Image: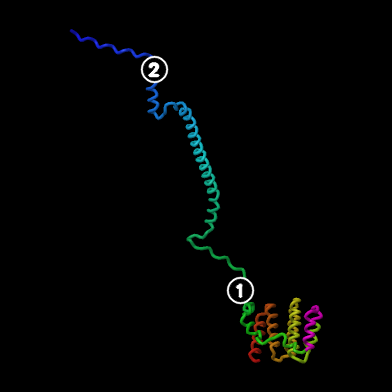
Amino acid sequence: PPPAPAPAAPAVPAPIAEAESAGATAGAEADDGWFFGETSEKKAAEPRKEKAAEGRSNTRAEAADEEQVADAVAQVKTKASAPRTASKSATAPSGGASAAPAASTSTPPSSTASPVGHGARAAAVPADYRASAATARSDVATAFAEAAVASTDAALAIYGRYMADNDALVAQEATLRAAALERRRGRNDTALGLVDRTIAAKPTNTPALSMLYVRRGDIHAARGDNDSARAAYEQAARLNAAR
């Protein structure tokens, strides 16, 4: 006889079937990385993430646009400066040769325009000179003290009287002081005349006479006559050695 048919499975009640379907759906959502009960919140957050990513993309695009603009500006500047660079290079000598220096317009100094060496004047200044040596006399000391506080004209008058003194040292010292006042007023010619006159009238070899030659040399040097200045300094040095 044919086998008996298998008994039919019992029908699942509708409420149980719905629960099983909901559980399967929940399991599938959990496998996709979503937690049960948080599915709606995470799905709601997803559009925000997409907008943030879109914002970052737009920012990168804007930065790229700014870089392109900066590159374009740099290229424009380079092209603008290219003609000037070319014109400069065109004026440069070929073959790598350096440009010839511009010709000097200054004239070489003549032999008489060379400055007097400091050594010549240093040797001319007498080491034994003392400005107070002439004031050993009381009348000279008093007169020179008055001249020191008097006006220039009054002082020159006082020194003028003692430039004719019989004592060579006093006359020479008075001339030195009078010449200094004249030079202070810018009267080099007058000062040189005083010095030359006393040198000729009172040639006694004293330290003050050597200083008169030094002053003569200084005046000549100030006037640009360096040869005469050197001659005066050398004469003072000879007087120093002879004393």
Magenta segment: does it hold 154? Answer: yes
Image point 55% across, 50% down: which residue?
81
Residue type beneath disc 2: Glu
Q: Secondary structure at mark 2?
A: helix
- Image quadrant in which you'd find residue 110: bottom right
Residue type beneath disc 1: Pro
Q: Is residue 168 visible?
A: yes
21 up-or-down from 97: above or below: above
Image point 52% across, 59% down: which residue?
92
In x, y percent, where is residue 163?
77, 87
169 up-or-down from 62: above or below: below
* Mark-to-mark CA distance, 1 and 2: 119 Å
Magenta segment: does it hold 132? Answer: no
Q: Quadrant of the N terminus?
A: top left
Q: Secondary structure at mark 1?
A: loop
Furthest residue in direction left, as rendered: 1
18 up-or-down from 243: above or below: above
77 up-or-down from 23: above or below: below
The answer to whether mark 1 and mark 2 are in CB contact below 8 A is no
Viewer-proximal residue among 203 and 2 = 2
- Residue pointed to by mark 1: 108
Q: Is residue 52 left or right of residue 187?
A: left
Q: Main secondary structure of the magenta part?
A: helix
**What's drawn in magenta, residue-wise?**
138-155
In x, y percent, where is residue 101?
55, 65
| Closer mark to the observer between disc 1 and disc 2 | 2
Q: Residues within 10 Å of mark 1 (few under 14, many from 20)?
A: few
Viewer-proximal residue among 43 and 151 = 43
- Residue pointed to by mark 2: 18
Image point 55% across, 52% down: which residue?
84
